[in-house]
Image: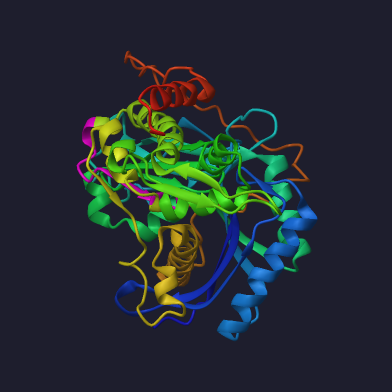
Amino acid sequence: MGTEIIVGLDIGTTKIACFIGVRGENERVKILGFGKTESLGVEHGMVKGITQAAESVKRAVEEASEQAGVDVEEVWVGIAGQHIKSRPSQGVVMIPSDHELIEQEDVDRLTNEQYNTMLEPGEEIIHIFPQQYYVDNEALSRDIPPVGVAGKVLKADFHMVTGNVQNLQAIKMAVQRAGLKIKGVVLEPVASAKAVLDDSDRDAGVAMVDIGGGTTDIAIFHDGIIRHTSVLPLAGNAITNDIREGCNILKKQAESLKVKFGSCLVQAVSENDVISIPGIRSQAPREIYVKTLAGIINARTKMIMEQVDYEIKLSGFAKKLIAGVVLTGGGAQLKNIKDLCELITTTDTRIGIPNEHLEPDSVSYKELMHPMYATGIGLVLFGLEQAERNADDEEVAGIKTKRKSEHVDIFADLTDVPENKPETKVEKPEPKDEKKPKHPKDETFGNAVSRFFNKVFNEGIDE
């Protein structure tokens, strides 16, 4: 078992959870401490109320720290939200004349220069993922790394993920007010993928869909490389709000109905099953048909899955997902959501649970075997991989060189940007003559629900 202790902090819309872990047997992660609290001050994955969020973070970390018996100073934080964007990028460097073959420092230089790419005002780079390398304008196969190849010009295509500086600052301030430092920030679908996917999934081609409370996060892999990322502003809370408004009940009651009796397919529930909801104060109990509940849930989840299908087609890898779609996050526990996803995407689907990468002797093991904890466990796995990679780099020939492969300190220049920062002119990839997939119809949710209720009541469900 490894000795490096990593702390992952999942700042979600409905919960804030802290995970303290180390490397266990068979490359798995052993969770030593786990803490969870209600998320305050967070909307759609973004920190709005900094003071409230800081208090929630502090309570979750204190609970995990007490359970693990360790003091927490630094954390790896997951990030999502509508402000997350992705874009293609391309870079090129000349190989020095004294390098007979391309060396690792040449590859690192090419990757690191992408951080000088001109961005839109207020954006900051979170991740840069290499897609394809070229040596002297000849593409290398994925089995041949550029290091050790003879050539004079090294070029690469990249997938770049950016976030809004203001939202990144809000996370930083909330964590600092909780008395902690940020070790690194990781895009939440990237972290979740660490927990629910394996190498065979990534090689075969897979779309990982993390349905949280405020956002639905998508990461698409093929040939072992992350190819496409996206964050949708619709998720579990939208479904709960629809139930609350459609059935005229309290939010807590709506959430309970969704979890206990909800279904994503109307045809999968009984025509006559009725749920009784206690009235407020002296009001009489309210009766709700299970089929009515399923209709509300179906309308919203169908909308979410149509957006997911659109993103999969937009990525260009829709026909290359041999491993299909993997649903994770709290929303993945909705009944029949797997079947609905398969109907809309016409792709094999499974529910992703962080069981393959979690040590059985972890604390709260049975509780953690749930899709909603994929991001937090993935953050610990991500942090462990980064720590091990940095340790390996330091051992090579006694040279202490750290690579910016998947993570960079995005908070280093948030407030003080160097005035004379060199700019790198980046070649834009040639536009491909491909048909853009048709976006899901711009139909209001109210119209969809109205059609459902009209159909239900015309058929005489109350008879």
How far across and how far down the image is residue 296, in percent? 46, 35
* Magenta residues (range): 319-332
Which quarter of the picture shows residue 139? top left
Q: Is residue 325 in the magenta section? A: yes
Q: Is residue 350 in the magenta section? A: no
Residue at 39% of width from left, 53% of height from top? 333
**Is residue 218 visible in this depiction of the protein?**
yes
Camera-side residue: 48 or 117?
48
Camera-side residue: 368 or 70?
368
Which residue lies most toward the front here? 463
Residue at 39% of width from left, 49% of height from top? 334
Residue at 30% of width from left, 31% of height from top? 344
Left or right of residue 227: residue 379: right
Camera-side residue: 10 or 303?
303
How far across and how far down the image is residue 364, in percent? 46, 77
Instruction: Pick the quarter of the image with the N terminus.
Output: bottom left
Which quarter of the picture shows residue 314? top left
